[in-house]
Image (cartoon, helix red, strand yellow):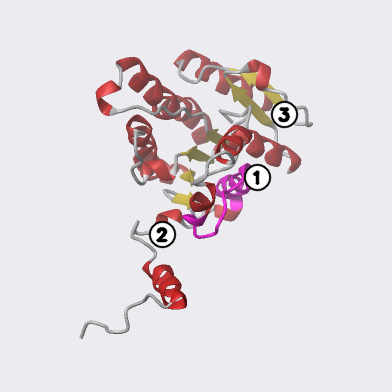
Amino acid sequence: MTGAATGIGAAIVTLLAREGAHVLAVDIDGDALRHDLPGITNCVCDVTSAAQVEAMVQAVIDTHGRLDMLFNNAGVGALCDVAETDDDTWDKVFRVNITAVMYGCRAAVPHMRQAGGGAIVNTASISGMRGDYGYGPYNAAKGAVINYTRSLALDLGRDKIRVNALCPGFIANTRLTATLEKLPQRREWDESIPLGRAGTADEMAKVAAFLASDDASYVTGAILAADGGVTAHTGQVNIHSVIRKMTAEGTYPASRDS
């Protein structure tokens, strides 16, 4: 489980451990890796290093003899205008978000094949399904995760290795929530989500655990948006809500087009 120190990754690690799994919790930030539940082993690893990822996977094999699930969750974003996007920013976003996914899969798949199957869950984003203002490198990298997931599902299906992508929407965390609470647009932000609120890391963990579990035994190549309904929207104004408000205020025109 990469990107395991905080947020969605930490929630997945905790959920799996409570369900009895042996979990290698991986993150580049060793100080933030504080999992202490039975069954969890903390591991510091730079997922942009192929050698370190190989060693990470081998550690699981050496300890447990097999690898059943791989969660590629590590990610990083960058806000930047296209004219101001430097090479280092672009390369970092791609190395962490998509190259690291390839490293993880490349290291894990031979062991899963030998074991007769397995499950891989890649954390993408609704930002890989749609565009965002000022988030070009992240949009591009997460879009790559989505299509790489589809390709892997095709290539590995006969090996009984399922590959799916989780696409979270707006997920509340301590830093982001504290920031948004200060914005006058916070209510409008929540109202733009059909379910009317941000998601939680625990909710994402349950979706990820499902995708990796035997309950999803016939699910592969799925790009699952867990976003409160955001991607169900065309992006158009909620005209129904506008008309209702105008009608209540008595400002909606009485005549209609024929």
User: Which residue is identified by label 2?
Assistant: 232
User: Which residue is identified by label 3?
Assistant: 40
Magenta highlight on residue 202: yes
- Mark 3 vs mark 2, foreground winner is 2
Q: Is residue 203 visible?
A: yes
Range drawn in magenta? 191-214
Q: How many marks?
A: 3
Disc 3 marks a residue whose amino acid type is: Ile
Q: Position of residue 202 (x, y in %)?
A: 65, 45
First in sequence, mark 1 or 2: give its number.
1
Disc 1 marks a residue whose amino acid type is: Asp
Residue 202 numbered tag:
1
First in sequence, mark 3 or 2: give its number.
3
Give me the residue at 37% from left, 68% from top.
239
Query: Between residues 20 and 110, which one lies in front from this camera angle?
Result: 20
- The Cα–Cα distance between marks 3 and 1, rounded to whole angstroms, is 17 Å
First in sequence, mark 3 or 1: give its number.
3
